[in-house]
Image (cartoon, helix red, strand yellow):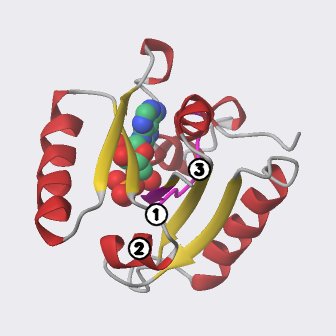
């Protein structure tokens, strides 16, 4: 069984993240979307709300699971039976960052990282941009996944 662990902050989970999951579905038997818990970053209540919302969103897709984790990513991946980490890149800057993490994770374990390149129309979508726009009262709904 090929299980992929898709770790991130997902604050918020965007259409860019959703596309990575959708495109990776044919490659794996299961994809676990894993919210990294960093207590210093935000209120836990909002994190748990976002996790519940995403569980709802993927409720009809049995191949997708949604969890949170506190451990080192490779350890959490293995605990969930995942031999693959799934990530996405939008730019050279993303690539440099992702390659470093992938190298370290490979040093630490036998977990392989699979990286998908964002399609051009999703390459400008980032959680930080969505947060910034929302902060200034702009409509960000087109960047967020809607309940199916
Ligand atoms: P992190 O805080 O670990 O970088 P993010 O939630 O920002 O987590 O992103 C999780 C993963 O999704 C990262 O690999 C990131 O590069 C990727 N990603 C984010 N937005 C997009 C997008 N629009 N298209 C493709 N990949 C994306």
Report the mark closest to the observer, 2 or 3.
2
Q: Are marks 1 and 2 in contact (CB under 8 Å)?
A: yes
| Marking on residue 120 | none
Residue carrying label 2: 78
Q: Nearer the viewer, residue 36 or 75?
A: 75
Cα distance, mark 1 to mark 3?
A: 21 Å
Q: Are marks 1 and 3 in contact (CB under 8 Å)?
A: no
Q: Which residue in the rendered view is the most extreme toward the top? A: 120
* Left or right: 91 as drawn, with respect to 49: left
Label 3: which secondary element: loop
Q: Which residues are magenta?
A: 4-16
- Between residue 35 and residue 80, name the one nearer to us: 80
Secondary structure found at label 1: loop
Residue drawn at the location 20% of the way across and 52% of the way down: 102
Q: For disc 3, does the CB lie below 8 Å from ligand 1?
A: yes
Q: From this view, report whether residue 128 is shown above or below residue 105.
A: above
The residue furthest front is 1
Which residue is identified by label 1? 82
Please state the horizontal and vertical placement of residue 137, each as a whole percent of the image: 63, 44
State yes or no: residue 34 in magenta: no
Q: Say left or right for 115 vs 57.
A: left
Q: Residues within 10 Å of mark 3 (few under 14, many from 20)?
A: many
The dot on residue 13 is 3
Mark pair 1, 2: CA separation: 5 Å
Residue 12 part of the magenta segment: yes
Question: SS class of the residue under badge 2?
Answer: helix
């Amino acid at each position: 069984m090929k299980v992929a662990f898709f770790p991130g902050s997902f604050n918020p989970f965007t259409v860019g993240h959703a596309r990575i999951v959708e495109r990776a579905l044919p490659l794996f038997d299961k994809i676990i979307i894993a919210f990294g818990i960093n207590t210093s970053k935000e209120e836990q209540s909002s994190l748990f709300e976002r996790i519940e919302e995403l569980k709802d969103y993927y409720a009809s897709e049995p191949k997708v699971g949604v969890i949170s984790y506190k451990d080192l990513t490779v350890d959490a991946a293995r605990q969930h039976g995942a031999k693959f980490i799934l990530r996405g890149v939008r730019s050279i800057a993303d690539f440099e960052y992702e390659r470093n993490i992938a190298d370290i994770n490979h040093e630490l374990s036998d977990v392989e990282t699979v990286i998908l390149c964002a399609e051009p129309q999703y390459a400008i979508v980032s959680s930080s941009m969505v947060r910034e726009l929302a902060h200034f009262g702009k409509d960000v709904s087109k960047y967020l996944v809607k309940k199916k």
